[in-house]
Amino acid sequence: MDSDQTLFHYSLLGLYLIVLPTWISLYFLQAPYGKHNRPGWGPTVSPPLAWFFMESPTLWLTLLLFPYGQHFSNPKSFLLISPFLFHYLNRTVLYPLRLWRNKNAQSKGFPVSIALMAFGFNLLNAYLQARWVSHYKDDYESDVLFWWKFLGGLLIFAVGMRLNVWADEVLVGLKKQGGGGYKVPRGGLFELVCCPNYFGEILEWFGWALMTWSWVGFGFFLYTCANLVPRARASRHWYLDKFKADFPTNRKAVIPFVY
């Protein structure tokens, strides 16, 4: 148990230590998948397979670790981990299936190197989130604000996930219409930001941080911002370069009216 506690603490420290380098590196160099795809990153696989592989630890590792937690028999721990699993059921299984059904969305390969890096991060994150919720969170019964934090965070999470799934469906649908090419997305929150899918995911993990009320949840929220905000910025520049006058210049990158 002491060895696991040491591993947990160093893993949490590691999560925070990679936030700033991730933000800085992605500010200057975008991961080469999707619209930022470019050669020079080694062998590639189909995007559906890559997404399934790299996101899968969030399901199998979480389910593997959860029964070993001291709070495994507490219904509140099951309730708390459910939004995390629900998000990653979509990201690991349903989203790759949508890509697989749309052959145009598979026109560019996904670098194996990027998939392996994402797999490693998801191993780290799944371990932290699962062990916190099932074992190290020690105030399930004493926290009088548990339900307020859970329900408030769940509301934000649900809004974010709905937005994330909707925006992904719009983008995949546009690729189907465009024969594998890109178009300027229109309608809904796309009128305000280039990447409402990223905004939705940021909202999700902010809600998760509120639900867990923990350094573990907050660290994941910070990492999500470090990963997605620079990518949204780069996506806005990409749209401007590609579509020029056809792209609304008042459209922000990821946060409506702000950035």
Image (spheres, grey):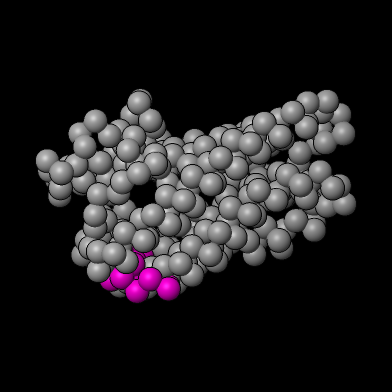
| Residue for point 70% across, 49% down | 81
170 left or right of 160 in image? left
Residue 181 falls in image quadrant: bottom left
> In the rendering, at what x and y percent does residue 47 appear?
38, 68
Comparing 68 with 146, the one in front is 146
- In the image, is residue 59 above or below residue 186? below
Image quadrant where one finds the C terminus: top left
| Residue for point 76% across, 41% down | 136
**Could you tell me if residue 7 is visible in this image?**
no
- In the image, is residue 10 above or below residue 48? above
Tell me, yes or no, whether the highlighted magenta stretch contains residue 103. yes
- In the image, is residue 93 above or below residue 30? below
Comparing 214 with 92, the one in front is 92
| Residue for point 27% across, 34% down | 251
Comparing 174 with 149, the one in front is 174
Residue 23 falls in image quadrant: top left
Q: What stretch is highlighted in magenta?
A: 100-113
Tell me, yes or no, whether the highlighted magenta stretch contains residue 213. no
Farthest residue, direction front = 187
- In the image, is residue 196 above or below residue 251? below
> In the rendering, at what x and y percent does residue 37 appear?
25, 60
Residue 51 falls in image quadrant: bottom left
| Residue for point 31% across, 46% down | 186
> In the rendering, at what x and y percent does residue 198 appear?
42, 44
> In the rendering, at what x and y percent does residue 45 appear?
36, 73
Farthest residue, direction left = 245
